[in-house]
Image (cartoon, rainbow, N blue to C red):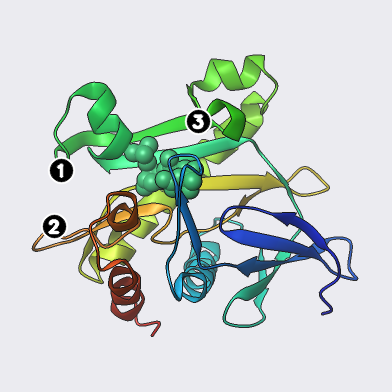
Amino acid sequence: MEKLEQLYEGKAKKVFKTDDPELLIVDYKDDATAFNGEKKGTIMGKGVVNNRMTNHVFAELEKVGVPTHLVKELSDRETLVKKVSIVPLEVIVRNVAAGSFSKRMGVPEGTQLLCPILEFSYKNDDLGDPFINDDYALALGLATQEEIDTIKAYTRKVNEFLKGYFLNAGMKLIDFKIEFGKTADGTIILADEISPDTCRLWDVETNEKLDKDRFRRDMGNVEEAYNEVFRRLGLA
Ligand code: TMP
Ligand code: ASP
């Protein structure tokens, strides 16, 4: 599959056209940003970890009935994916209090939640991805009720799968963010990535952080954490 002109460059990935109008190539970078792009840096090797981890997880999710954009891994950093229009919702699931939830709600990080929380942000960098609810999404035409129902059902399935998947590798899934896309025929499928950029993962014994919070909070050993997740998942 030939890589044609660049369609888009995001904070962590570039997207290229191919000679098939229904397929794109994503190319994962080592660039890292936080706080809506205010903090910038490089996490050496991150692109490889995030590409290969996402593809592995997406292939497993397909097996449990969550359709994804994955077509084929092309190289360490490049993957062929189905072309979608991204639904402008950041879909976040929280199992344990952390991050913006802890701040907003005054609940200490690490507090077990009584049930998982599914929340939406409006994917809009100019506005800093504001917190919204279903009515906002419907009223603004970001998604239909049917699409929201589908997204929520898939998201809960993703959480149930990922919790066990990471626990098997000695990590607690604290929270994560996923994104969905719509194919030309309107089908909702999982897109974007599932990686230490987009999940909070804590060591099951020590609660050591093994994710992008090490970069966001200047904790050091960032590359080591990404490599450790990769190794524990049996991908190294
Ligand atoms: P938060 O606690 O900062 O709202 O983050 C919740 C989860 O979403 C956490 O696992 C990190 C992930 N996340 C992203 O993937 N992208 C983002 O831009 C933000 C703010 C969070
Ligand atoms: N990548 C996001 C940004 O730069 C934020 C984050 O993951 O914390 O806005």
Can residue 160 be spotted in the picture?
yes
The picture quadrant where one finds residue 221 is bottom left
Element type where label 3 sits in the image: strand
> 125 left or right of 232?
right
Q: Which mark is residue 207?
A: 2
Disc 3: which residue = 121
The reply to whether callout 3 and callout 1 are in contact (CB within 8 Å) is: no
Position of residue 156 measured from the top left corner of the image (x, y, whole percent) = 42, 44
The picture quadrant where one finds residue 85 is top right
Position of residue 143 measured from the top left corner of the image (x, y, whole percent) = 66, 28
Disc 1: which residue = 110
Element type where label 1 sits in the image: loop
* Mark 2 or mark 3, earlier in chain: 3
> 146 left or right of 184?
left
> 136 left or right of 16?
left
**Is the CB atom of the residue marked by disc 3 within 8 angstroms of ligand 1's nearest atom?**
yes
The reply to whether callout 1 and callout 2 are in contact (CB within 8 Å) is: yes
Question: Quadrant holding ligand 1?
Answer: top left
Q: Is residue 151 above or below residue 122?
A: below
The residue at 33%/56% (across/down) is 215
Amino acid type at image mark 1: Gly
The quarter of the rendered structure image containing the C terminus is bottom left
Crowding around mark 2 (Cα neighbors within 10 Å: few <14, some 14 to 19, many 20+) is few
Amino acid type at image mark 2: Asn
Q: Is residue 19 above or below residue 163?
A: below
Q: Is residue 69 above or below residue 230?
A: above
The residue at 57%/81% (across/down) is 76
